[in-house]
Structure formats: structure tokens, C-alpha cells
Image: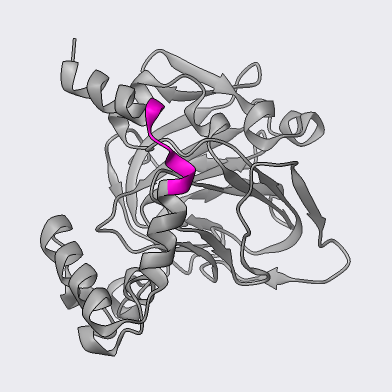
Amino acid sequence: MNHRAELFVAVQRILPKHALSRLIARLAESQNQWLKNLLINRAIKTFDINMDEALNDDLSSYKSFNAFFTRQLKPELRPLDAGANTLTSPADGVISQAGKISKNKILQAKNVNYSLTRLVGNARQAKQYENGLFSTIYLSPKDYHRVHIPADGQLISTRYIPGELFSVNQQTAEMVPNLFARNERLVCEFKSQQLGHFSVIFVGAMLVAGIETVWSGMEKPGLGAIRENDYSDQAISFLKGDEIGRFKFGSTVIVLFPENAVTLDKNIKATNPINVSEKFGLINH
């Protein structure tokens, strides 16, 4: 029994996670020179962030901690796999889990499953992924925090689902039931000529200061009703590898593919690292 993990989860249960996360959001957006420089330098040391990969390595030029945290990388370090039938990773991070969606269940951690319908917040949408494939990618604080689309696609809809803000690290995933279906999240559904429909889901977490998309900016957090937006008539389209959004702190991305649409690469399995734009799998024809 891991008592430290149990204590970590127990503390999370009693913390005012939303209030704490919103406070962090305000600090992270501050343009006070002393504060933002302090936060940036502490983050680099604490999380061992590799600034050699950053397109801009001049720390003083970042207007805020969030500007630093969502920094761009040198493009040559993440070359896009340009194969006509390949999927590419939507993010830098570590594969938490990957595999088949069966009986409306997704694997969260060893011997722990959760409801796909609850995750996406819509039974119709969940049904179209039955017997399909999923992958969950955990972004730690040291990782690149922009999210990219894994295949060509047109944005069809988004669904913001309010919820908890538990940490999404492995310890918490093993101990908090329905973690990803409990946390605040943004479900983005796309339509592709090659794949049919597929989804990219931004999952919020403790201290995540926000989820932002390229089509609507910051997603306003809240504890009220689910918010749905229909973009099907707006022709918002992306090519494989295009940026679609970003996190303001470490979190998780989940991708969903329909039955028989894709084959994931053999390296897409739990605990394996992955980089954005790296080959993720093949589109079946």
C-alpha cells in the first residue's frame, strides 16, 4: 500500500481546488517583472525544463509566466510525420493508457475503468466510438503545452463539462475512480474524410490555470451547466499537426477514434514517452 499516494489524494479531496487553481491563474497571468521572473526561474529549476528546445530562450522577454509556460518549441525538434496515412501525436508527454473502447468503458489505470459516455457527456457521441481506440497522454509541468490535431479535420462541436480539478498524475489515476470523467474538460469533436468523426479532449487538473483553443480563446471555467457549441457550419478546418489549443499547466489529452478507423503504433502503450508530431498510428482504409 502506497501511503504517500493515499495522503496525496486525501489532501486533494479537502483542498479548495477550484479557488486555488483560479488564484494560480491570476498569478500566472501577472506581468509584474519580479513575480513572473521568479515563477519562471523556479519552474525551470523545479521541473527541469529544457530551455534549449524553446524557440525563444530569452526568459526576460516573456510577458507572463503563462506566456513562458505555453512557449513554442524550435520546429526542427518536432518534425511532422508527413505520411499520407499516418496519425501524429497531439502532444508531448507520456502515454498513460491506450487501447480498445469496449462496452462503453475506457481504461484509466490498471484494473480501473470509467464511462466513455460520462467522459464525453453525450450518449450519441460515445456510441460512435464503441469498439474504437483511445489514447490518454499525460503532460507533466516540464512538457510542451500546446496541443495539435492528429489528423486533418473540420471542427464540428465542442462541449465544456464543468467538474473537479484533481491532479491527473499516475498516483491519482490509480486511486480516484472516474478521474477523467470527473475533472473539468473540453470535448472537441472533428470530422475527417479519412476517419469519420474523432475527438480530442482537453482534461483540466489541479492548478491548471486554463484551457485555450485557437478558435475561441480561453474557455471560461465554471461550476454550472454544460456548455455546447456547434461549429459545423463555420468551416473551421485544420491540417494534421496544426495547433488547436493549449494548457496553462500540466494536464491530460485524450483522443478517441471510431471502430476500424486506425491502428495505433506498437509504442503507444502505458509509460512510454511521446512527442508532438511523432507518428502515432496509421489510418486504415
Which of 1 and 283 lies nearest the eye of the viewer? 1
**Horizontally, is 31 left or right of 22 in the view?**
left
278 or 149, nearer to the observer: 149
- The magenta segment is 13-19
- Main SS class of the magenta portion in the image: helix
Q: Is residue 54 above or below residue 278?
A: below
Q: Is residue 239 visible?
A: yes
Residue under the point 37% across and 67% down = 28
The picture quadrant where one finds residue 32 is bottom left
Residue 112 in the image: above or below residue 128: above
In the rendered image, residue 14 lying in the magenta stretch gets the answer yes
The answer to whether residue 57 is magenta is no
- Name which residue lies at 80% across and 56% down: 229
**Could you say which quadrant of the image residue 255 lies in?**
top right
Closest to the observer: 87 or 159?
159
Asked if residue 163 is positioned above or below residue 209 in the image, the reply reads: above
Q: Residue at x 52, y 23 (%)?
A: 178
Residue 109 in picture, x, y percent from top left: 38, 23
Res. 58 in view:
no
Using the image as rendered, state which of residue 4 and residue 26 is in the foreground: 26
The percent coordinates of residue 267 (x first, y second) are 33, 41
**Residue 47 shown left or right of residue 149 in the figure:** left
> x%, y% of residue 192?
72, 57
User: Residue at the location (65% across, 16% down)?
Assistant: 103
